[in-house]
Image (cartoon, helix red, strand yellow):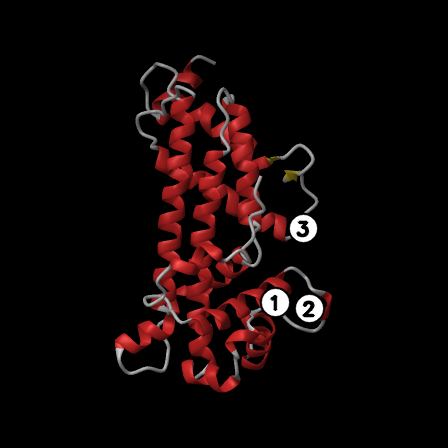
Amino acid sequence: MVAYGDSAIAHLAEVDLAETVTNLSRVRAQNRARLANSALTRAFLNAAMSLSEDLFAGDDDLTEGVPQSLAHLSRPRVVGRAQKDYPDLVPTEAKFRDRWAGQQDFIDDFIAYALVVRRVNLGAAIEQISRESSAGEDLPAALHRIAYAGALLVLQLPGFRLQLLTIASASAHPLVSRALKDMYAQVTQAWFGLYERVLASAGLALRRDVTAEEFSIMLEALGEGLGLRLLADLEEPLVDHGERRSLLGKAALGLILGFMDDGDGLGVEDAVASRLGRL
């Protein structure tokens, strides 16, 4: 199983950032697009990603007296990390200011970029989860495997925490809101394709009023709720790393049991009414 880490930004090398990094100090759109995709612009953004990862992961040197928020991503810290990680590009504060006139301009671009990082890396991870399917794997084992991997993806650092911060403030930033919607749309589509293949390989059909897309959205929502409880460090049986299972897997099996068409052709509500009528 792959280690799903937001720090693995290799997938972003070929992604066009012209529509993501939009607060750059350039009058002409062509110049802004070129600057958005420059190696040094990416270096500053990646440096902020690394700082966020250190902070949210609980680096003792960083967290003492520092709230886990985007306020940590000050210009000196970002430039200093870029100088450490990308010395060949010679990052300086002057070059940073040449790109972003104000700190909030950088923060807004960084949030949009972080969502793109999460979207691309989640898509790559889901694709690998799909490739790991083995011939003859039974449905319970497949769902437990996928759900456990999904639980790890929800806890991806710093992506999930940044995602939560973004959701709370997205309405005030149209471009960030669009990036958030794009992330959910593409990741949901990836999960949808995976669950559709798993169900088809098991020879199962969902009840006529439930789609594979709806099923995957429900599991995504359950996974994010599980992630919130894991972040809260609750004393609950949420994930068993030894057995590589999670409560999400059990929930997935329960959903399958309820939504599976067992040949009666009924929708969910009629199936429930029929079952209750036989009690």
Residue at left offset 44%, top offset 73%:
41
**What SS does tag 2 mark?**
helix
Q: Which residue is mark 1?
A: 68
Q: Quadrant of the N terminus?
A: top right
Nearest the eye: 201 or 168: 201
Q: Which mark is residue 233?
A: 3
Going by the numbered disc 3, the residue's amino acid type is Asp
Tell me which numbered mark, 1 or 3, is placed earlier along the sequence.
Answer: 1
Q: Which residue is mark 2?
A: 63
Residue 185 lies, in percent from the top left, at 35, 49
Few, some or many residues within 10 Å of mark 2 (<14, 14–19, 20+): some
**What SS does tag 3 mark?**
loop
Nearest the eye: 168 or 84: 84
Going by the numbered disc 2, the residue's amino acid type is Thr
Few, some or many residues within 10 Å of mark 1 (<14, 14–19, 20+): some
Distance from the alpha carbon under mark 1 to that under mark 2: 7 Å
